[in-house]
């Protein structure tokens, strides 16, 4: 199972990514959780302590490693460097593992360049993401920024499910529609929606009416448990039983749709 989770900042995509990682790990599956959002906070949601997080270094900032593998220093524009660098040892060598057995990789982002930059660090990160999605047997869950620009067509074709988390609001819905359109350009036909921060049935109805052909596969209720977990820096799956229950239902729905699609194929 390879899942890409995206959405506007603050809608709950990191909550969804962390809890789904935990649920798959509980089933005994090997799970790699990838924080591909420059505003990285997946480590906190997975239960790492502040001290542990201080020692974590995003891969994009590993200048020596990137230079060794690509033949060029990060920040270098143009020039000659390897487009297919060795990355198969990175998931084991650069990850941190939670007490639940989830491997966490923090991708990071070049400080000097945009995500579309043709430079060594972005080539390295895209190659690593393709390796994780296309070439490994693990469950891979990618917590992405609000968009999918850093995915290539080859990577997108290996993703089993694109999930956009939305909250009741026009700006969040607009982000979901933009993701749907970008996904189509990469050949992805199915983009699923999860409703986050839901307070009542009216919120769900608002989202259903505005997601323009995308399929709503579940919702996560807004509760004080989730807010408190965030403030305390605690893992949501341990501090918020209601979110654990809601996301377990979403996972089961997603599993059914993906396995059904594979059987049909």
Image (cartoon, rainbow, N blue to C red):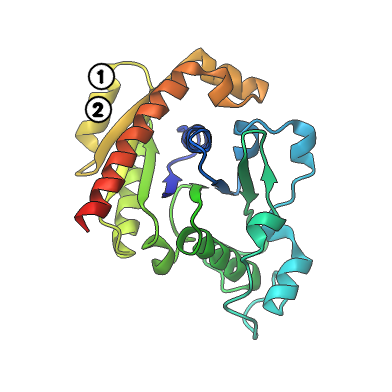
Give how far apart the Cα atoms at labels 1 and 2 are.
6 Å
Query: Which residue is outermost to the top?
Result: 224
**Residue 73 in sight in this render:** no
User: Closer to the camera, 153 or 20?
Assistant: 20
**Which residue, given by chain and number where applicable, does mark 2 sit on?**
206
**Residue 66, disc:** none
Q: Which sits in the foreground, 101 or 34?
A: 101
Q: Can you tell which quarter of the image residue 220 is in?
A: top left
Q: At 30% across and 35% down in the image, what residue appears?
A: 253
Expressed as whole percent of the image width and height from the top left, the position of residue 239 reads: 57, 18
- Residue lying at the far front in this picture: please name it: 28
Q: Which mark is residue 202?
A: 1
Is residue 162 in view from this perspective?
A: yes
* Residue 202 in the figure: left or right of residue 70: left
Q: Are marks 1 and 2 in contact (CB under 8 Å)?
A: yes
Residue 194: x %, y % from top left: 35, 34
For the point 22% across and 59% down, the residue is 265
Residue located at (23% from left, 53% from top): 263
120 above or below 133? below
Q: Dot 1: within a 10 Å radius of its alpha carbon, few (fewer than 14), some, or many (20 or more) residues?
A: few
Answer above or below: position of 71 versus 157.
below
> Taking 12 as reference, is 176 left or right?
left
Q: Position of residue 75 (x, y in %)?
A: 69, 70
In the displayed structure, would residue 47 be above or below residue 82? above
Dot 1: what SS?
helix
Q: Position of residue 94 (x, y in %)?
A: 70, 55
- Label 2 neighbour load within 10 Å: few <14, some 14-19, many 20+: some
């Amino acid at each position: 199972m390879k899942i890409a989770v995206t959405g506007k900042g603050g809608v709950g995509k990191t909550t969804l990514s962390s809890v789904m990682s935990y649920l798959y790990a509980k089933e005994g599956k090997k799970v790699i959780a990838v924080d591909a959002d420059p505003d990285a906070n997946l480590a906190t949601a997975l239960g790492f302590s502040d001290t542990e997080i201080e020692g974590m270094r995003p891969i994009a900032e590993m200048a020596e490693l990137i230079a060794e593998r690509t033949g060029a220093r990060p920040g270098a524009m143009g020039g000659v460097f390897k487009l297919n660098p060795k990355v198969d040892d990175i998931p084991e060598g650069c990850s941190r593992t939670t007490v639940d057995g989830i491997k966490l990789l923090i991708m990071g982002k070049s400080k000097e360049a945009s995500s579309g930059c043709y430079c060594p660090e972005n080539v390295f990160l895209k190659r690593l993401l393709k390796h994780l999605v296309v070439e490994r047997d693990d469950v891979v869950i990618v917590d992405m920024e609000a968009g999918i620009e850093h995915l290539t067509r080859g990577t997108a074709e290996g993703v089993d499910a694109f999930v956009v988390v939305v909250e009741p609001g026009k700006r969040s819905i607009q982000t979901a529609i933009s993701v749907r359109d970008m996904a189509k350009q990469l050949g992805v036909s199915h983009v699923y929606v999860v409703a986050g921060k839901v307070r009542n049935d009216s919120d769900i109805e608002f989202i259903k009416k505005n997601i323009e052909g995308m399929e709503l596969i579940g919702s996560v209720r807004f509760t004080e448990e989730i807010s408190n977990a965030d403030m305390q820096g605690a893992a949501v799956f341990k501090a918020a039983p209601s979110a654990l229950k809601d996301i377990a239902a979403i996972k089961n729905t997603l599993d059914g749709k993906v396995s059904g699609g594979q059987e049909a194929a």
